[in-house]
Image (cartoon, helix red, strand yellow):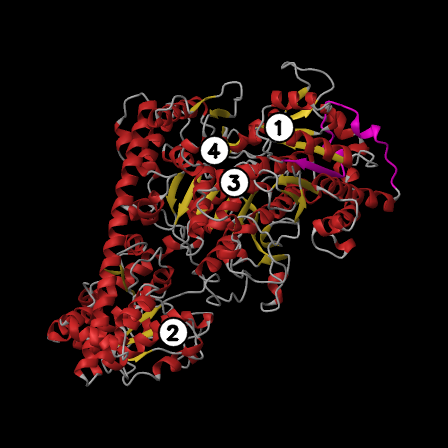
C-alpha cells in the first residue's frame, strides 16, 4: 500500500465508522432492505476487474455521503475491494516467488550439466567479463570511444572499408513506415521504432563499404491510410551527400521494400500479424534472391551478392529474420524493442531468434542484464564461460550462445548548431530554424504562463501511467521553491477531445489535469493540445533558451531517445535511474538520475539544476561535448564492426552442374516461362471460383460422384492437376512425359511446373500409403510430367524405401524426399549408391542446416534426459535412443508411452537452458522424438529447394492432415497452397494439448491459399 495514501485513508475511515461495519446485523439489514448489496457489487465489480481510479471515485462519493448508514455501507464495500486487492497482490507475489525459485533451480541444473560436459577447468576468463566484448558504454567509456567527428578517424576508417560492397537487410513489420513525414504517434505501432529503423537504414546507406540497404516492411493498401504505404519501393534520400564516401551504383543506396502479406486492403495491429509471418518470409525470400542476382551482375561479375546480415527489429521481425536466415544461411542479428499482447507467441518468437542469432543488439546494458536473461535461451553466466572457451580454442561440446552488445540508437545532428547564450538566454542559431521569438509552438506554450521568463521544466511523453507524469506534477505542486523558480511544460501527444481518446490515456490525462487543479498550478503548467513532429526541435530550443531542464520520470525507460535529443539542444536532464538513462548519463554526464517512485527526490533534483547556474552550465557543456558519441555515424561504425565479426554463411553450392546449366531447356527461366497462366488456373481450382465457391469441399460435392472421403480426395487432386493442365493447353505447349521422368544426376525439380508435397502425418502407415498412392496416381492422369512430387515425413530414408516397395511405388516417381522431419534431403537415383538405396543425399542442404548443431554433446544430453524420465516414472524404458532412426543431423528417440513424457515445450526449454540450439519435434503420434538442427524443418526444406533449384513457392501444393507432428503448423502458412485433409492425423492432437499459444496465433485460417478437403474416412 506504500505510496497510496488515499487507500490508507480508506482503512482509517473504516476503523472510525464504529459499529457500522463490525455489526453484522446492521450490515445484514442493509442488504435485506435492497438499498445496496455489497456482496453483489463485490462479485460483479471486484472479481471481474478493478481500476484504481474507480476506487478513488468511490471513495470520494463515500466521503461525501451525509447519511451515516449509507456511508458505512459504502465503506464496507470499499473494505471488501481493498481486501481483494491485497489478497490478489499476495497471490501474485507468491506465484512470482515460486516461479523464480523454480527457474533458479532449472538454470542452476542446466549450468551444472553443461559444465560437467565441458570437462576442462574454468579459467579466470570464464569467471568474469571479457573486456573485448563489453558494452561500448561500460566502464571508462569516454576514454575508449573514439570521436567520429574527427576527420582523421573517419577518413582512416573509410579507407579501410571503401572496397567492401555490403548488402544489408533490415526487417520491421508493424506500423506505418515511410521515409518522410512519418506519422509518429498515429497508433501504438507507429512510434519511436519506426523513426529508428528508417534513420538506421538511411544512415547505413551512407557508410563506406555499404552498397545497398533494404528495409523490409509490410505493404499496406488500405483506404484508411495514405497511398504511399502501398508503394512497393521507396528510396530513402541520403541525409547528406557529403557523408557518402562510397561509390554509387544503379541499385545502391537505402530503400524501403514493402512486401504484401496478411489481409489485403486492411491495416492491422502487430498482435494480429503473427499468423501471416510465413507469407512475409516467402515474399521477402523472393525479393532477396532477385536482388542478390541483380547486385551480382552489377558489382560481382555475375556471382550473387547475398546479404551480409539480416537484422530483425521486435519479435515479429526477429521470427521472420530467423526463418530467412535459415533459408539463406545468412547471419542473423536481433534488436529488442518492448511489446504487449500475444505474449506467449512473442516469447516463443524471441526464443527462436535467440536460437538462430549470432548477435543480439540492444540499446542498453540493462536490457541484457535484466530482460534477456529472463529467456530460457540466454544465460549471461554460461555465455561468459562459452565465450572464454571459444577464445581459448576449447570445445564447447555443441553449446552456443549469441553475443550481446549494447549500441545506443543514433541521432542526426547536422542541422543542430547550439550556441552558448548569455545570462538572458540568447537564442541558438540554426541554419534550418532561424532564431526567432515568434515560433508558433512557442506562443502556444507561453500563453499558459503568467511569467514566461522563468526556466522551463520540460517533459515530453504520451499520457501513459508508465511515464509517471502524475508523480512529476505532485513533486512540482508540493515544492513551493520549485514553483517560484520554474514553469512546467507537459507535451503529452495530440488531442482534440479527451472523450475521444482511448480509455486508459483519457483517464490518466484527466488525473493530471485534476492535480493541476488540486495544487492550483494555473499560470505555471502548460499542456498544449497539439504539436507537430517538426515542432519538437523548437520546443527543446525554447526550454534551453529559458535555461530549463528536461525530465524523463518514467518508471522504467528502455532507452530514452528524448534524453539524447534534449542534450543535443543544450538541455541538462533529470531522468529515471531504471533502464537506458543510466547508460546515457554515464556517457554524457549532463544531469541527475532519480528514483521515479520518490517524489521528493524528483523535486530536489529539479530544484538543484534550476537554482544552481554553475551546475546547469556544466551539465549543458558536458552534454554538448559528448553528444557526438550518439551520432548515426558512430552507431553505424560500431554496428558494422560487430556485423563483420559474424562468420559468413552465404549459400556456396557445389559446382558440379555445368552440363545441367548449359542446357537451355533446363534453365529456370524457360521451365517456368508459362507460370502466370498456370498459377491462375491452379488458384481457380484451389479457391473453387470456377464452381462459385471459396471452399474446395463445395466444388467437389458438385461433381456428383464424390460419395465418400476417398472419392473426394481423388477429385481434389484431380481438380488441382486439371488446373495445371488447363494452363498448359491454353499455351499450346506440348511436353512429353518421358522428358520429365528420365533420371539424371541433377534434380528434375527445375523442369516441373508444379510440385505436390505430400506431408500428411497419418495415424497408420496403411492410411499414409493409400493417400500417397492416390495423390500420385490421380495427379499423373494427363499431367504429362508437369507435376512433380515430394514426400515430406519424419521417417528415415530406409523406412521410406520400404514403404514405397510395399505399395508398389517407384522412387523415380518422386523428385525429392524430405526425411527425418526435415534434417535430410534426398533425390531419387536410377542406381543404388553407397547406402545400397536408390537415393542421392543433398550434401549442400547439410551445409545449410549445420549451423549450431550440437553433435555428440547434444546426443549425450538427450540420453541423460531419457534416463531421467525413465527413472522418474519407474516403469522401465519409457524413452530410449533410436540408433537406426538417427542420422548425422537427426537424433531420434523411441517413446513407449507418450503420456508419461513431458510435453515438447519442456524438452525445448531444457535444451535452451543448456545452450543447445536444436529443433525438437514429437512425431508419429508421440511414438518418436526427432531432434534436428535449429535451422532445419520440413517447411524450411521447401524454402531451400526454392533457393537452390528455383522452384516457385506459389506453385507448390502441400497436402497435410487435420493435425500432425509438432512441426505441423509450419506447413500451413506461406505463399504455397495448402490442402488440409479433414479427419487425417487426429491422433496427433494429444501432442499439441499443452501448447503455449493457440494455433490461431500461428496459422491464418482465413488465408485463401489454405483449403480443406475430405481425407480418408474409415
Q: Which residue is mark 3?
A: 989
Near-viewer residue (255 or 557): 557
Q: CA distance from mark 4 to mark 1?
A: 22 Å
Bounds of the magenta segment:
733-759
Q: Earlier in the sequence, mark 4 or mark 3?
A: 4
Among numbered discs 1 and 2, the one appearing first in the sequence: 2
693 lies above or below 805: below
Whole-angstrom CA distance, mark 4 to mark 2, is 46 Å
Mark drawn on residue 303: none
Q: Mark 1 sits on what residue?
A: 765
**Residue linked to disc 2:** 506
Residue 146 vs residue 992, the one in the foreground: 992
Q: CA distance from mark 1 to mark 2?
A: 61 Å
Frontmost of labels 4 and 3 is: 3
Q: Quadrant of the N terminus?
A: bottom left
Marked residue nearer the N-terminal end (4 or 1): 1
Residue 730 percent coordinates (x, y): 86, 47
Mark 3 or 2: in front is 3
Front-lying residue, 363 or 486 = 363
- Callout 1: 10 Å neighbours few (<14), some, many (20+)? few
The residue that mark 4 highlights is 920
Find the distance from the CA under tag 1 to the CA under tag 3.
Answer: 17 Å
Amino acid at each position: 500500500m506504500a505510496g497510496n495514501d488515499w487507500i490508507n485513508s480508506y482503512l482509517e475511515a473504516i476503523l472510525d465508522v464504529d459499529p457500522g461495519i463490525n455489526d453484522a446485523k446492521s450490515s445484514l439489514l442493509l442488504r435485506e432492505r435492497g438499498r445496496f448489496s455489497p456482496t453483489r457489487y463485490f462479485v460483479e465489480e471486484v472479481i471481474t476487474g478493478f481500476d484504481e481510479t474507480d476506487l478513488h471515485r468511490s471513495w470520494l462519493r463515500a466521503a461525501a455521503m451525509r447519511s451515516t448508514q449509507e456511508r458505512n455501507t459504502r465503506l464496507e464495500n470499499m473494505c471488501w475491494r481493498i481486501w481483494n486487492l491485497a489478497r490478489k497482490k499476495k497471490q501474485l507475489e507468491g506465484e512470482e516467488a515460486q516461479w523464480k525459485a523454480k527457474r533458479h533451480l532449472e538454470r542452476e541444473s542446466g549450468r551444472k550439466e553443461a559444465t560437467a560436459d565441458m570437462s576442462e577447468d574454468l579459467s579466470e576468463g570464464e569467471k568474469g567479463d571479457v573486456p573485448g566484448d563489453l558494452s561500448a558504454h561500460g566502464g571508462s567509456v569516454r576514454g575508449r570511444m573514439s570521436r567520429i567527428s574527427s576527420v582523421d578517424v573517419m577518413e582512416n576508417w573509410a579507407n579501410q572499408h571503401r572496397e567492401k560492397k555490403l548488402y544489408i537487410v533490415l526487417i520491421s513489420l508493424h506500423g506505418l513506415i515511410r521515409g518522410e513525414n512519418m506519422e509518429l504517434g498515429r497508433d501504438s505501432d507507429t512510434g519511436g521504432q519506426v523513426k529508428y529503423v528508417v534513420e538506421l537504414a538511411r544512415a547505413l546507406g551512407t557508410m563506406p563499404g555499404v552498397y545497398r540497404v533494404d528495409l523490409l516492411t509490410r505493404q499496406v493498401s488500405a483506404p484508411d491510410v495514405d497511398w504511399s504505404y502501398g508503394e512497393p519501393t521507396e528510396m530513402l534520400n541520403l541525409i547528406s551527400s557529403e557523408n557518402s564516401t562510397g561509390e554509387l551504383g544503379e541499385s545502391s543506396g537505402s530503400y524501403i521494400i514493402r512486401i504484401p502479406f496478411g489481409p489485403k486492403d486492411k491495416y492491422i495491429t502487430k498482435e494480429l500479424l503473427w499468423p501471416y509471418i510465413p507469407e512475409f518470409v516467402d515474399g521477402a525470400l523472393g525479393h532477396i534472391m532477385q536482388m542478390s542476382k541483380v547486385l551480382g551482375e552489377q558489382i560481382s561479375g555475375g556471382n550473387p551478392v547475398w546479404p551480409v546480415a539480416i537484422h530483425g527489429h521486435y519479435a515479429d521481425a526477429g521470427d521472420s529474420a530467423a526463418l530467412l536466415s535459415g533459408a539463406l544461411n545468412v547471419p542473423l542479428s536481433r534488436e529488442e524493442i518492448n511489446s504487449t499482447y500475444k505474449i506467449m507467441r512473442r516469447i516463443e518468437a524471441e526464443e527462436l531468434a535467440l536460437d538462430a542469432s549470432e548477435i543480439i543488439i540492444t540499446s542498453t546494458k540493462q536490457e541484457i542484464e535484466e530482460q534477456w536473461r529472463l529467456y530460457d535461451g540466454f544465460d549471461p553466466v554460461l555465455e561468459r564461460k562459452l565465450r572464454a572457451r571459444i577464445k581459448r580454442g576449447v570445445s564447447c561440446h555443441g553449446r552456443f550462445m549469441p553475443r550481446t552488445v549494447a549500441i545506443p540508437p543514433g541521432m542526426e545532428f547536422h542541422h543542430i548548431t547550439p550556441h552558448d547564450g548569455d545570462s538572458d538566454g540568447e537564442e541558438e542559431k540554426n541554419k534550418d530554424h532561424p532564431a526567432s521569438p515568434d515560433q508558433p509552438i512557442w506562443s502556444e506554450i507561453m500563453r499558459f504562463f503568467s511569467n514566461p521568463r522563468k526556466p522551463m521544466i520540460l517533459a515530453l511523453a504520451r499520457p501513459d501511467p508508465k511515464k509517471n507524469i502524475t508523480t512529476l506534477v505532485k513533486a512540482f505542486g508540493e515544492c513551493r521553491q520549485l514553483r517560484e523558480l520554474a514553469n512546467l511544460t507537459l507535451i503529452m501527444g495530440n488531442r482534440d477531445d479527451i472523450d475521444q481518446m482511448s480509455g486508459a490515456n483519457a483517464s490518466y490525462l484527466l488525473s493530471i489535469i485534476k492535480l493541476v487543479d488540486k495544487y492550483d498550478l494555473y499560470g505555471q503548467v502548460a499542456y498544449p493540445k497539439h504539436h507537430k513532429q517538426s515542432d519538437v526541435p523548437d520546443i527543446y530550443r525554447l526550454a534551453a533558451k529559458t535555461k530549463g531542464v528536461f525530465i524523463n520520470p518514467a518508471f522504467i525507460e528502455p532507452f530514452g531517445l528524448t534524453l539524447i535529443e534534449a542534450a543535443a539542444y543544450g538541455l541538462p536532464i533529470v531522468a529515471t535511474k531504471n533502464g537506458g538513462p543510466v547508460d546515457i548519463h554515464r556517457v554524457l554526464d549532463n544531469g541527475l538520475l532519480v528514483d521515479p517512485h520518490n517524489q521528493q527526490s524528483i523535486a530536489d533534483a529539479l530544484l538543484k539544476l534550476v537554482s544552481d547556474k554553475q551546475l546547469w552550465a556544466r551539465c549543458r557543456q558536458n552534454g554538448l561535448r559528448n553528444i557526438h558519441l550518439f551520432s548515426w555515424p558512430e552507431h553505424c561504425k560500431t554496428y558494422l564492426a560487430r556485423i563483420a565479426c559474424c562468420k559468413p554463411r552465404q549459400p556456396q553450392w557445389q559446382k558440379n552442374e555445368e552440363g545441367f546449366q548449359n542446357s537451355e531447356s533446363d534453365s529456370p527461366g524457360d521451365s517456368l516461362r508459362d507460370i502466370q497462366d498456370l498459377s491462375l488456373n491452379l488458384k481457380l481450382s484451389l479457391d473453387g471460383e470456377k464452381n462459385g465457391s471459396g471452399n474446395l469441399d463445395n466444388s467437389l460435392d458438385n461433381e456428383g460422384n464424390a460419395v465418400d472421403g476417398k472419392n473426394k480426395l481423388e477429385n481434389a487432386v484431380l481438380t488441382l492437376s486439371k488446373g495445371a493442365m488447363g494452363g498448359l493447353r491454353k499455351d499450346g505447349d506440348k511436353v512429353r512425359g518421358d522428358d520429365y521422368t528420365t533420371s539424371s544426376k541433377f534434380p528434375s525439380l527445375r523442369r516441373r511446373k508444379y510440385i505436390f508435397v505430400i506431408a500428411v502425418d497419418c495415424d497408420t502407415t496403411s492410411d499414409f500409403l493409400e493417400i500417397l498412392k492416390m495423390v500420385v496416381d490421380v495427379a499423373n492422369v494427363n499431367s504429362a510430367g508437369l507435376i512433380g512430387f515430394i514426400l515430406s515425413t519424419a521417417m528415415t530414408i530406409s523406412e521410406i524405401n520400404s514403404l514405397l516397395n510395399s505399395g508398389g511405388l517407384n522412387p523415380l516417381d518422386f523428385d525429392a524426399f524430405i526425411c527425418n522431419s526435415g534434417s535430410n534431403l534426398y533425390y531419387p537415383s536410377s542406381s543404388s549408391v553407397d547406402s545400397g538405396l536408390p537415393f542421392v543425399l543433398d550434401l549442400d542442404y547439410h551445409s545449410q542446416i549445420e549451423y549450431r548443431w550440437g553433435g555428440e554433446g547434444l546426443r549425450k544430453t538427450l540420453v541423460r534426459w531419457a534416463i531421467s524420465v525413465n527413472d522418474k516414472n519407474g516403469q522401465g524404458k519409457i524413452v530410449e535412443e533410436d540408433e537406426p532412426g538417427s542420422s548425422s543431423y537427426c537424433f531420434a528417440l523411441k517413446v513407449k508411452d507418450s503420456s508419461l513424457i513431458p510435453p515438447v515445450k519442456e524438452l525445448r526449454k531444457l535444451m535452451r537452458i543448456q545452450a543447445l540450439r536444436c529443433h525438437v519435434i514429437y512425431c508419429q503420434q508421440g511414438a518418436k522424438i526427432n531432434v534436428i538442427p535449429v535451422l532445419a524443418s520440413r517447411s524450411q526444406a521447401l524454402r531451400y529447394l526454392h533457393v537452390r533449384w528455383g522452384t516457385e513457392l506459389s506453385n507448390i501444393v502441400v497436402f497435410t492432415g487435420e493435425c500432425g507432428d509438432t512441426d505441423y503448423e509450419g506447413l500451413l502458412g506461406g505463399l504455397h497452397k495448402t490442402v488440409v485433409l479433414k479427419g487425417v492425423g487426429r491422433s496427433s492432437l494429444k501432442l499439441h494439448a499443452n501448447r503455449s499459444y493457440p494455433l490461431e496465433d500461428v496459422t491464418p485460417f482465413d488465408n485463401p491459399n489454405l483449403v480443406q478437403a475430405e481425407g480418408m474416412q474409415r
